[in-house]
Amino acid sequence: MDTEASPFRSIAAQLRGAVKTCRGIASHAAKLALDIALPTLCVACREPVDGEGVCAKCWSKLSFIAAPFCPRLGIPFVYDPGPGMLSMEAIADPPAYARARAAVRYDDVARTLVHALKYQDRTDLAPAMGRWMTRAGLELLEGADALIPVPLHWRRGWSRRYNQSAALARVIARQSGVPLSGGALRRVRPTQQQIGLSRPQRASNVQGAFKVAADRQSDIQGRRVILIDDVLTSGATADACARALLRAKAASVDVLVFARVVDTHKAPI
Ligand SMILES: [Zn+2]
């Protein structure tokens, strides 16, 4: 995606930069005036768009996950095997968490959104992505007590400035009314990036990396919690987090992500 391709886009980028600067120093009114002057851009391709979110072209390229899917893993089925039927993956290798749901399949447009939110400071993407997640997770959110974002290690959080999972969780909390419980689950040791690791390597990389803070056990004990993350790949991170939450006596742990890799062999990250 080349954001500098047209003069229009670079002007918009400069204006956005100016808006950011304004946030710290100028009045709220000045920021508001600049915001109004800016056309809304598609969050994926940055073409002007009516309303917010993605343009019709990018929308059509997103693969929203809908029933039928595995009730355990949320993996879409190509045909409906009937109520309660689990996927082969769920039977062969059942996760520590109870249920996982994702808004979309992890493909090109989804990858663009995830990377922009994670690495390019595009926090403006969180509202749209969080809304889609709320819709995908309705079934889980109905009975839930708390949302738990997958934590970054403080060192990574420091360099990246914010946690994308927490940004998504804040939107879902606002939309669903399920409270966010930030800071209860901690990453107690830094882990290597999961990118490029095999499935067993991913599992051992995150094993023992998460822990519920001793002074926050009461936030988790007996609660039905939903773990929030941007992408579900092998499920190793979600599984390690779920184990930590279950050790702290969570009543149940479900997982809600923006995108999930549906076929790890066909869709490497
Ligand atoms: Zn677009």
Image: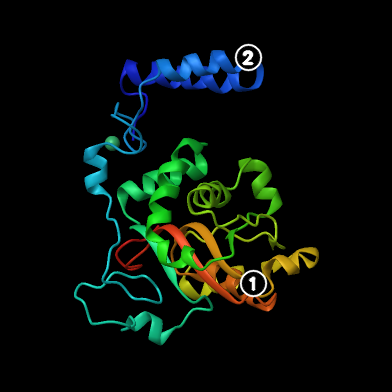
Q: In the image, which disc is placed on residue 173?
A: none
> Residue at 33% of width from left, 75% of height from top?
70
Count of numbered circles on the image: 2
- Considering the numbered disc 1 on the image, is that residue within a helix, a strand or a loop? helix
Query: Quick check: 32 left or right of 263?
Result: right
Q: Residue furthest bottom?
A: 92
Q: Which amino acid, mark 1?
A: Leu
Quadrant of the image where one finds ligand 1: top left
**Quadrant where the C terminus lies?**
bottom left
Residue beneath the point at 58% across and 67% down? 225
Which SS class for mark 2?
A: loop
**Residue 249 picture quarter:** bottom right
Q: How far apart, in angstroms, are the residues tagged by discs 2 and 1?
A: 43 Å
Which numbered tag is attached to residue 26? Answer: 2
- Location of residue 118 in the rendering, given as x and y in whole percent from the top left corner: 51, 45
**Quarter of the rendering occupied by the N terminus:** top left
Where 108 sits versus 141, above or below?
above
Which residue does the numbered mark 1 point to in the structure image? 245
Residue 23's place in the image compared with 254, above or below, is above
Q: Amino acid at mark 2?
A: Ala
Expressed as whole percent of the image width and height from the top left, the position of residue 238 reads: 53, 68
- Cβ of mark 2 under 8 Å from ligand 1: the answer is no
